[in-house]
Image (spheres, rainbow, N blue to C red):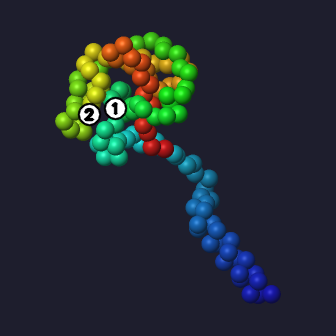
Amino acid sequence: MKFKKLFCGLTALALLMFTGCNIQGGTTTVSSDRIDAAEVLTLNSDADIFQYDGVIYKTNIDWVEELSLTKDVQIGEIKTKNDTNTDFKNEMSNKLPVGTKIFSTKERGDILIVESEGKIKKYLAIVEG
């Protein structure tokens, strides 16, 4: 009987330690880190990306291409092109030409639409969660 109580007590203690239980009732914060151009281009050196408002956006993602999205208001444009390194700044692209217009979408906040050379492209915000 003593062994059973000891075993149950140790098991309960181990569970508390493993689950990180906070007896004082603290809160847990989950943050989302942004991925930079270097990380995206390390995974795919041919990726078509741009940076807007501190976030990297990438195109040619199959499930994004299948979405039916409505172009909303123009929020910016590509101001510089950087196809030589991974040091990106806002409104900078590695493939889109300077002057390409960037639009929000009515349906989603994580996808932007660009108009470039008569074509529409959809770009997904690349973030870690």
Mark sitting on residue 88? 2
Between residue 115 and residue 36, name the one nearer to us.
115
Measured from the top left, where is residue 46 in percent x and y? Answer: 31, 38
Assess disc 1: are there few (<14), some (14-19) or many (≥20) residues with their C-alpha within 10 Å of its C-alpha: many
Assess disc 2: are there few (<14), some (14-19) or many (≥20) residues with their C-alpha within 10 Å of its C-alpha: many
Measured from the top left, where is residue 19 in percent x and y? Answer: 60, 62
Q: Which residue is mark 1?
A: 49
- Please give left or right for residue 24 compared with residue 82 in the image: right
Kindly report which numbered mark, 2 or 1, lies closer to the viewer in this rendering.
Answer: 1
Q: What is the spatial separation of the Cα atoms under label 2 and label 1, in whole angstroms? A: 10 Å
- The answer to whether residue 76 shows anywhere in this view is no
**Is 74 drawn above or below residue 41 in the view shown?**
above
Q: Earlier in the sequence, mark 2 or mark 1?
A: 1
Q: Quadrant of the N terminus?
A: bottom right
- Residue at figure coordinates x 23%, y 23% from the top left: 80
Q: Are marks 2 and 1 in contact (CB under 8 Å)?
A: yes
* Helix, strand or loop at mark 1: strand
Q: Residue extending furthest right?
A: 1
